[in-house]
Image (cartoon, grey):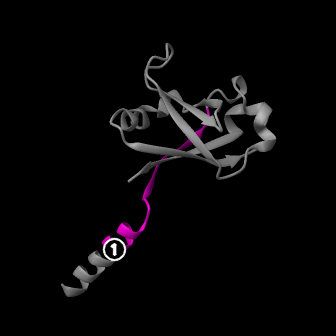
């Protein structure tokens, strides 16, 4: 039993020392890449780059829309079929972050950029 408590205390100590804990909650392609700044920015994008996630509850096409931006430029959206949990987390005030998980030169724009979404604790 003592070893369980020591392990728990060590885990809590490491968590307290860390700035934050990030939990991967979604990994998906980027929707709308071909309609926004993606092609113009392609050569500048790097694996691991931070992406801003912006809620658009007034979006006329999707009330759960989450816009994805790189350095203030819109790249696209989280796919409509996969944005419900992230939109709900953002609406509750939870901190979420996006990162570029993959960049692939592919003729299909849905396969060019993959985004990882994290909830930050």
Measuring from the top left, give residue 26's x and y in whole percent: 49, 45
* Residue reaching furthest to the bottom: 2
Quadrant hosting residue 58: top left
Displayed quadrant of residue 1: bottom left
Quick check: is 43 in the magenta stretch?
no
Specify whether 39 is left or right of 84. Answer: right
Q: Report how many numbered discs are placed on residues in the image.
A: 1
Residue with the mark numbered 1: 13
Q: Is residue 34 left or right of residue 99?
A: right
* 80 or 13: nearer the viewer: 13
Residue 78 visible in the shown view:
yes
Q: Secondary structure at mark 1?
A: helix
Q: Quadrant of residue 11?
A: bottom left
Give percent across and percent down for residue 61.
Answer: 51, 15
Query: Where residue 52 sits: x, y (%)?
Result: 56, 39
Q: Is residue 47 above or below residue 36?
A: below
Q: Is residue 105 visible?
A: no
On the image, the x and y values in percent for residue 53 come to 52, 36
Residue 21 vertical position relative to residue 97 in the rendered view, above or below? below
Q: Residues within 10 Å of mark 1 (few under 14, many from 20)?
A: few
Q: Residue furthest top?
A: 60
Q: Identify the residue at horizontal 30%, vertical 80% (top origin).
A: 7
Residue at the left extreme? Answer: 1
Q: Is residue 13 magenta?
A: yes
Q: Which segment is the magenta one?
A: 11-30
In front of the other: 115 or 95: 95
Left or right of residue 53: residue 76: right
| Residue drawn at x 73%, y 44% as measured from the top left | 45
Quarter of the picture holding the C terminus:
bottom left
Give the left or right position of residue 120, taking residue 31 as reference. left
């Amino acid at each position: 039993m003592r070893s369980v408590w020591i392990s728990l205390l060590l885990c809590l100590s490491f968590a307290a020392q860390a700035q934050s804990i990030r939990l991967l909650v979604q990994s998906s392609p980027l929707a709308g890449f071909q309609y926004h700044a993606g092609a113009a920015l392609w050569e500048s994008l790097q694996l691991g780059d931070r992406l801003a996630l912006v809620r658009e509850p007034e979006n006329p096409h999707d009330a759960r829309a989450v816009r994805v931006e790189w350095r203030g430029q819109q790249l696209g959206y989280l796919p409509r079929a996969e944005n419900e949990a992230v939109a709900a987390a953002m609406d509750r005030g939870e901190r979420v972050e996006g990162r570029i998980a993959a960049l692939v030169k592919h003729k299909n724009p849905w396969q060019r950029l993959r985004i990882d979404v994290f909830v930050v604790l």
